[in-house]
Amino acid sequence: MGLGAYIAVSAALFALGVVAIVVRRNILYVLFGIEMILNAANINFVAFNRFNGDGLDGRMFAIFVIILAAAEAAVALAIVLNVYHLFNTTKPAEVDLLRE
Amino acid sequence: MDLTFHPESDFKLLLAVPLIPLCGYLLQIFFGRFLPRKGDWLLTGGMFATMCITLYMFAKAMNHAYSGGGHGGHDEHEALIGFFHESRHTGFKWSWLFQTGEAPDSVRNLTIGLLYDGLGAAMLAVVGVVSFFVHLFSMGYMQGDRRYHIFFANISLFTVAMLGLVLSDNIVFLFIFWEIMGLMSYLLIGHLAQDPTSHRINHAARACKKAFLTTRVGDVCLFIGFMMFFLHYETFFFSELWAQVNADVALNGWQSWHTTAGLFLFGGTVGKSAQFPLHIWLPDAMEGPTPVSAMIHAATMVAAGVFLLGRLYPVLSPEVLGVVTVTGATTAIFAATIGMTVFDIKGVLAYSTISQLGFMVAAIGCGGVGLVAGLWHMVTHAFFKACLFLSAGSVIHGCHHEQDMRKMGGLRKKMPITFACMLICTLAISGVPLFSGFYSKDKIVMASFLSLGHEFNGPALWASIALPAAAAITAFYMFRLIFMTFFGAPRDSHVHEHAHESPWPMTVSLMGLAFLGIFGGHLWLNGDLLGAHGTWWEKLVMNEHNLADLSKMYGGVELQNTYGGAAMDPHGHVAHSAHIWALGVSSFVAALGIFAAWLIYHKKKIDPARITARLGGLYTTVANKYYIDEFVEITVIKSSVVTARFLRWFDENIIDGCVLLVGRINRTLGFIAAWFDKTFVDGLVNFLGTLSNAMGSALRLLQTGRIQQYISFAVAGGLLAAAWLILS
Amino acid sequence: MEHILSWITFIPLIGMTAIICLPKQSVGLIKRVSLVATGIPLILATWLYFQFDPQSVAGGGFAFEEHIPWIKGISANYSVGVDGISLPLIWLTCILLFLGVPASFGIKKSEKAYYALLLLLEVGILGVFISLDYFLFYVFWEIMLLPMYFLIGIWGGPRREYAAIKFFLYTLAGSVLMLIAIISLRLGTGTFSIPEMVNMAQAGLVVGPEFIGLDYSTWVFWFLFVGFAIKIPVFPFHTWLPDAHVQAPTPISVILAGILLKLGGYGLMRGCFPIMPVAFQENAYALGILGVISIVYGSFVALGQTDFKRMVAYSSVSHMGYVLLGTGALTVWGTDGAAMQMFAHGTSSAAMFMVVGVIYDRAHHRDLNGFGGLCQPMPIYWGLTTICFFAALGLPTMSGFIAEALTLLGAFQAGDPRFQVLVLISVIGIVITAAFLLWAIQRVFFGSLNEKYKDYPDMTPREIFCMAPLLFLCLLFGVFPHILLDVMEPSVQHLVTLLSVGK
Amino acid sequence: MDAYIEPLKALAPELLLTAAALGALVLDLLMRGRDSRFVGYFTLVSLAIVAIILMNRIGDEPTAAFGMVVVDNFGTFFKLFTVASLAVVTIFVLSDRNESHHHIGEYYFLLLGAAIGIFFMVSTNHLLLLMLGLELLSLASYALAGFHKGERKSAEAAMKYVVFGGLSAGVMLYGISLLYGLTGTLDLVEMAKSTGEAMPAGLAGQLTTSAVPVALAMVLVLAGFAYKMSVVPFHFWTPDVYEGAPTPVTTFLAVASKAAGVAALLRFLGALFLGPDVQSVVAEYGASVGQLLAILAAVTMTLGNLSAMRQTSLKRLLAYSSIAHAGYILIGVATMTGAGFEAAMFYMAAYYFMNLGAFGFVLYFEGTLGSDSIEALKGYGFKAPLISIAMVTFLVSLTGLPPTIGFYGKYLLFKEGLDAGMYWLVGVAALNSVVSLFYYFRIAKMLFLKEPASGSVPRQPLFAGLLAVLCVLTIYFGLLPDAIQEFVRNCLLI
């Protein structure tokens, strides 16, 4: 299985993530979308590191990204929770006090 | 006393001529109100001094002229040119524009001085005398005016302007004084516009504006004219201008631009001397107090225009002179006809002035002897017209500011002195022999004949027909005035009862001027008594039988634009025959006119009403001054006002609101917030404002507040960027 | 006295600081301080004017120069100096600002801020006139805007906000163009020093890239020109002027018309034409046309006005047209006339605005048709007004006449014969100017007196004190023009030689 | 052992900051959150110490630590910038009248945390560390944005911020991964240096073979920076978050966080395209990237100014103005020259004074009037003259008129732009500064040209004093910018 396949997968994942962020009604799915993007990046890192390049840069990076993702998820969820309390909705489309 | 000409001392004297009244003016304007009698004595006294100086200098001039020139001459240049003095040549000058560095010596500077020649001498004397008498007269006439001291200040500054104009040796300063005169005429004609007691307050307000603006048109022409001459000859000085033009013309002949420039110069005369079609201001100038009218009509304003022609005669090309002749002759006959229909006593005089000015201008246009005759008529006319006006003023004063002749009549008994003076001057203006007017007018007619005899051309022909006719009409309406005012039964008893002779200052000045009205022309007799040759005037300016001497007037410049000269008429035969004819014709037409007036208005053989009825439309046309005023009102004034209104609209709506349209559209789209409407309504501001505002509003549509839409926009943008980077 | 220019310029700044430190309540003291802070510069400037030897700058160069390194990062220097063109304007500035203070005594709203801004304004104006360094020039140029904005915006008439922002925007729009041009000049010449730029221009060394399809000299020239033309103001950039004038309080209109408009003309003579002489020569005729349009158009629009102040404002448009016409003609007389016109108009138009102010303070309206017969209750006012108006319409013995006559004569002699046509057209403006001024006099002063103006008081000594000196100057320079022309002449001549390089 | 101690010295500021952050947290616990102001003072002190250390570093030779951290003047400049702005922000927090000063110790902790993130962000050539720093900054910022938990606006702001930020972070990561894949290294210098023979090829090689992925990666990475700098089209979060977040936080985002973005971008571009031994191909590619940035700059400033035109909320207006200013800064960046970068850095310095001042004013009058609507400003100038005059000065500076530092900054940007031949861009910028006058002076108009409404405003002398100082500095450095310019010169990247 060559590098191309990995890239294809990650690209698909990335695209899915973006789409999810844009179209899904529920905020949680939006957050999932973000996670998907991060993981798409991860796949790239690992794959590239595996196929070309010596050293562990890519894998290290992937690990860090996982940590980042966790931290970000934590913060994000806290915020979303707070929003839910104040707006009684999980639909980002309905959270639009701040606009022109 | 020593009557030889000493340039240094004499130029200082001459300088005093305008300066005395000027100082008087300054004193008067600031302290006049505090002086006893509001300071009229101050200015009148000053004017008396001025008059004395001018007369003294005039005597010198006479002496100089009779002693054949050269006496006063310090270098043979002056000796050669006979009686002619320019202070710059005797080192008496003033660097005006620049005084330090290189500039003073450059052509760009203006080093000015005095010019005192025959023409100047005569004019100066006339102005001095007349304006003194006018001052004197005013002391009586203006009593009780609420701005008495201001009036005196202004009228003396008016005189200053004229004196300066006569003395200036370059056209720029002539122009400057010319303009000042315009200002003063504005103030003086408008004198009553500030007097709530005057019932014609609004007329005065209009009249003064009209006078200034109309003459201003002429002034601008004059400015352009001498600008064009400067462009080619780089000098403003009369003497240099004459010399260079004639040298140039002698070499290359007259060029077309000479004519153009000459016409522009003549435009100045047309404006100031109230020639057709710019004459419209002069009748309205009646709104000023009578002494002012006297000044304007006799000594200052209108004389200035003729004087200018005299000064610039050598630079006018024959074509221009033709135009001058036609204009003058036309004006003469045209104004005369109107004069017959006017009932305002001052109005008659006003139109007579215009017509007489026509005579002068036409004569100058004829050139040669005509030039002299025209200028001479200016002198004689100054005397009798001043007298006529003052008499009219005296009548009006006597009749408590009643000006309508139809209300007068039979005043002969009530105010004998006035009557006498007025009669004398009427005889003079009608050109009755032995009165001053005759001599000049007769020479004018002669001049027209002469030029016709020399060269049969349209202008000369028109002049030869129009001028005698005008002379006849003049005689007619002047005597109409006399008969209606002084003879017959009083028409308005009320006016008649209260009529009274005027106080001494007025009568004295009347008599003084009347005297000159008789003898202003008779002075010709001295020299060699009864000898037909060499009147004082001819001595002063030329010898009519030898046109080459015309150059004496212009510092020995050989004139290029006038006909004849000794060669063409060696023994003066043409001149002689023309003289005989002129004598006959002018005496005849004068008699004719007077007789007709006597028939109609004294003997009442013919009822004027019938004639007017017979004439019908023609009469009304004439009576309405040929509708010139209305015409101007419509064409010039209305059009410019309309233009102004339009341009204002244009400015406020098009220029300032260049893209107001965009604003409108946007507003209808409802994109503009209220404050914006309020703050930026038009102009570039509006353009920028509405445009950017509209775009702003469009952009606001992006900011929906929905995070996911934001993200989709962002992604789209990112893709665009990527695409760009890939494609580049 | 080697720092006299700096003193003249910055004494008002000291005065401003002093005023800021003063308490709001002590109005009298504030007024006195501002009188002093404007008076001292006036004295110094007068001394300077008569101290100045025109011949010393005959071949170019400047007098009373100061050069101090300022911003090393871009090698901009604080270098100042005067020549025959700037000195009279500096003098004029000091005069008008000094007269502007008593003229402002009528203002009753937060005086402290008002006088502080007034003094700041003076600093800006004087700074522009003395700067020989383009960066410095620009800084001062912009500093002027702010006080002007607030002076119009806070103390102005009903539509003051609109007028203020309009003034600000127009000028800013011009000055950003200027900024771009200045920067590219800096890049092209490697210096900010105006004299050096001029010298390089003489040697044809001012070169650079083309922009929006125009070659370097052309676009830089037009950018600078527009920047200054808006201030002059030249048709069609003039529409800010009437609004600004009408809304501004009297003393501010006086300063606006008297000096700020001159900055445009001065800028052209100092910072635009000599640096781009070739482009100038190419476009000289266009400038002449613009000038004539301004003259004729301005006078006609003025004739169409019914608002006294608007009329006067448009008369400024008309008069400033002569500056362009005269300079464009590229003759010494023409440029003399232009330089003189700036001074002449500075005095006469300032006086005219004071005239308007006097009547507005009494009647609280400016409708020309609403007056009539005012010469009866107010003879002095009528007298001064007449002098002032006749000065404005270029009556001989008034400085305006000298200026206009020289301009027209100069333009008529221009090497380019097409200018003669322009002159012939422009004289229409002269007649129309006379027309609307006299018409105004007739409508305001003559005729039967309107009852409600019957008992108006005549001009107060303060008002006379504000107006009389200006009229006196009009007369003085009209009768003795050499007092002014001698100072200008050498510099003007040098300017003309600079502009006619390669001709 | 020294091998570990030496680098730690190099990291002293970061460590100290971390200590301070923890200290703040602990202190808050000890105080039991009675009055958190004390924590604020503690923060100020620690910031001061850090600042002193950093000052002493200016001019030192660049050193490296752990092969990732680069300690150079460029970094130090932005660290100082961060510290300085943080100090002001802290003062803002302390004098925020809408803030109950209880149990908000973590406020300061979060600020310090964000600072740590910035510190790492600006001092590395290694994409991993850069990413980590950026994320740290972001996480802290999310929390700060939503700090007023009870307020819906604040919560919404936080949510939008986190979603948008998360996405951008992901996108950037993806871009980085692509770069890594294309060049086989995460070190920018390496990337630019490698000739392309090696397998995998360096950037130089890839540019010749596979341009499309490079372009993609480039855009994705730039998107990350653009988001931090709030450059169009990644600016959408800005107005909403600025409006919703507490004003001090907004200030922090507008100044410090934006600066961090700029710094990172400069570092990225500098290392990649302008380094000493960059491949010529790469350098050329940098030019076209510069073109892209130029376009973004034009769009950004125009859009920012136009949208600011009709705002009713002062904070929102300033948000758009900050977007516009991001555009101006990009001019300097887009020139892709050292001088251009210098201009950009100087403009950041200018931006520091004027924007802190402007936001300070917002905070002040929010605190006194309880609203940030522009209408509420009517006649405020007559009630609180000092700060209103200061505000006008800031506005003048933001418009870019003399005699303020804003003008000089703009002058430098224009100059470099013209020097780099981007006439059209400078033209757009000039037009923009005219347009910007509209809305900036709408505020000035409200302040002074309108008649004041009745009622007086409570005074905050110290706070007003701070604003006055900023105002004076704005003018002082506007007239004598040499000091700052020298400083910037010493801190240049290239």
Image (cartoon, grey):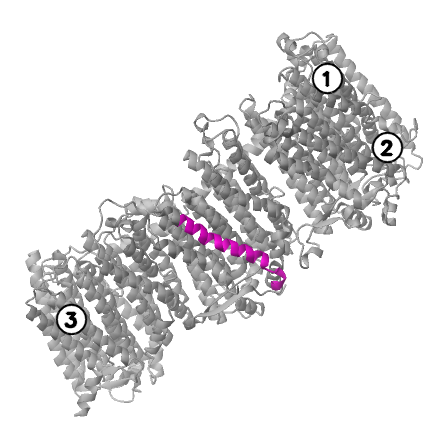
The residue pinned by badge 1 equals B418
Reading the chain from its start, which is encountered first: label 2 or label 1? 1
Q: Are marks 3 and 1 on the same chain?
A: no
Of circles 2 and 1, the one toward us is 1
Subunit under mark 1? B
Subunit under mark 2? B
Q: Position of residue B260 (x, y in %)?
A: 70, 43
How would you classify the magenta stretch by its main secondary structure? helix
Of circles 2 and 3, the one toward us is 3
Q: Position of residue C341 (x, y in %)?
A: 57, 50
Residue A48 falls left or right of residue C459: left
Residue B402 falls left or right of residue B58: left
The residue pinned by badge 3 equals D42
Look at the image and tell me in which quarter the C terminus of chain D lies: bottom left
Q: Position of residue D410 (x, y in %)?
A: 37, 65
Q: CA distance from mark 2 to mark 3?
A: 115 Å
The crowd level at tag 1 (other Cα within 10 Å; few <14, some 14-19, many 20+) is many
Q: Is residue B254 visible?
A: no
Type of amino acid under label 1: Thr
Is-magenta flag for residue C34? yes
The crowd level at tag 2 (other Cα within 10 Å; few <14, some 14-19, many 20+) is many
Q: What range of the chain is rendered magenta?
A: C30-57
- Label 2 residue SS: helix
Type of amino acid under label 2: Trp
Q: In this rendering, is residue C468 above or below A24?
A: above
The residue at the point 48 percent across, 43 percent down is C313
Is-magenta flag for residue C278? no
- Please tell me which residue lies in front, B632 or D84: D84
Q: CA distance from mark 3 to mark 1?
A: 112 Å
Disc on res. B536: 2
